[in-house]
Image (cartoon, rainbow, N blue to C red):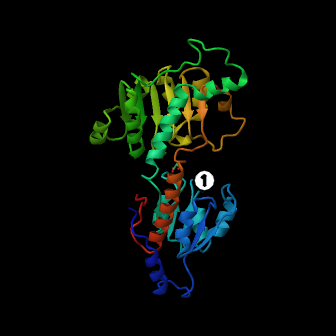
Amino acid sequence: MPPRLPIARVRNFLQLGLRTRTMSSQPSVYVTRPDVDASGLELLRKSCQVSTWSETLPVPRAELIRQIAGKDALYCALTDKIDKEVLDAAGSQLKCVSTISVGYEHIDVEECKKRGIRVGYTPDVLTDATAELTVALLLATNRRLFEANKQVFNGGWKSWAPMWMCGQGLKGSRVGLLGFGRIGQEIAARILPFKPAEITYTTRSPRPQEAAAVNARHVDFEEMLRNSDFIVACCALTPQTKEIFNAAAFQKMKSNCIFINTARGGVVDQHALYDALKNNTIQAAGLDVTTPEPLPLDDPLLKLDNVVILPHIGSADIETRKEMSRITARNILAGLVGEKMEAEVIL
Ligand code: DGY
């Protein structure tokens, strides 16, 4: 049950004249994507003046800087870099920034906090969708689904053949997760029925209670790299995890290791990953996230058969994206009147 919408509070806020505006004016919100689910925008339109960028590609930075001037709130996405320059352009009336994503590394949260600007995001709601996609990507990679599907169309399928298009199963394997937050735990819960020999996880501090629920064992990064048949990156991108999967890390992995990344492209040194895949240092990779996004069509990774690449669709489940749109809006409505946000980034 979503919390009571603070729409009435937003109206009161206006009527009480807490701001130096005329009685008829409403708080102004700039939305950087016109194609977010309409239900979120409708919530905002009940009590705010909403203007949106008009195209489905991300708003150009110069336009964002122009549009945000004088706005009370910003509804943004992970494709928008919200830094000091944007906040300066907004002006001191900006009360909140709300992103339609669980990741918020595109927002300078510290700078927002310094200015008293609250930051909303959308955790939890996308946990299941992202865990589901991670397992789908893992299965597509280890059982070579895209490679096999290509054979159907290019004439490579001559006959059933005993060892053709074989991959390695999850059963009896060792699966290592870097990150064991909500998404990591749900990935583990979905992998468990495939009967792996062991699920391990690497985090700064162990989470014994959550781990017990999915039979997972805490290991250090080194052990995870050396012993896993599957490694899944499902951590936040932070200074500590930036390019943590580098050449040295790939060198330590088993040669049959399958690397899956549904976190952020930035956790991987992509040149090192390319070399590891090309030289068969590791078996294969499944990536839902890359650097940059979209990946240029001439990127060398696209020439490899042992990599599956998806266009950042981890949370792209219809109901999930609709609810993400509404949460982003409700965070703004709460932020405008100083109420508790449904999900606020707290530093
Ligand atoms: C997020 O929310 O951070 C995902 O990467 C996209 O939904």
Residue at the front extreme of this rendering = 159
242 is higher (above) or lower (below) than 257: below
Using the image as rendered, state which of residue 145 and residue 82 is in the foreground: 145
Q: Residue at x 41, y 31 (%)?
A: 176
Secondary structure at badge 1 equals loop
- In which quadrant of the rendered view does residue 192 lie? top left
Using the image as rendered, state which of residue 280 and residue 49 is in the foreground: 49
The residue under label 1 is 79
50 is higher (above) or lower (below) than 210: below
Q: Amino acid at mark 1?
A: Thr
Using the image as rendered, state which of residue 321 and residue 339 is in the foreground: 321
Q: Position of residue 260 (x, y in %)?
A: 51, 33
Q: Residue at x 27, y 41 (%)?
A: 209
Q: Position of residue 294 (x, y in %)?
A: 65, 44
161 is higher (above) or lower (below) than 254: above
Q: Residue at x 61, y 29 (%)?
A: 146
Q: Position of residue 159 (x, y in %)?
A: 64, 14
Query: Could you tell me how many numbered marks the image carries?
Result: 1
Local crowd size for mark 1, using a 10 Å CA cut-off: few (<14), some (14–19), many (≥20): some
Q: Is residue 307 visible?
A: yes
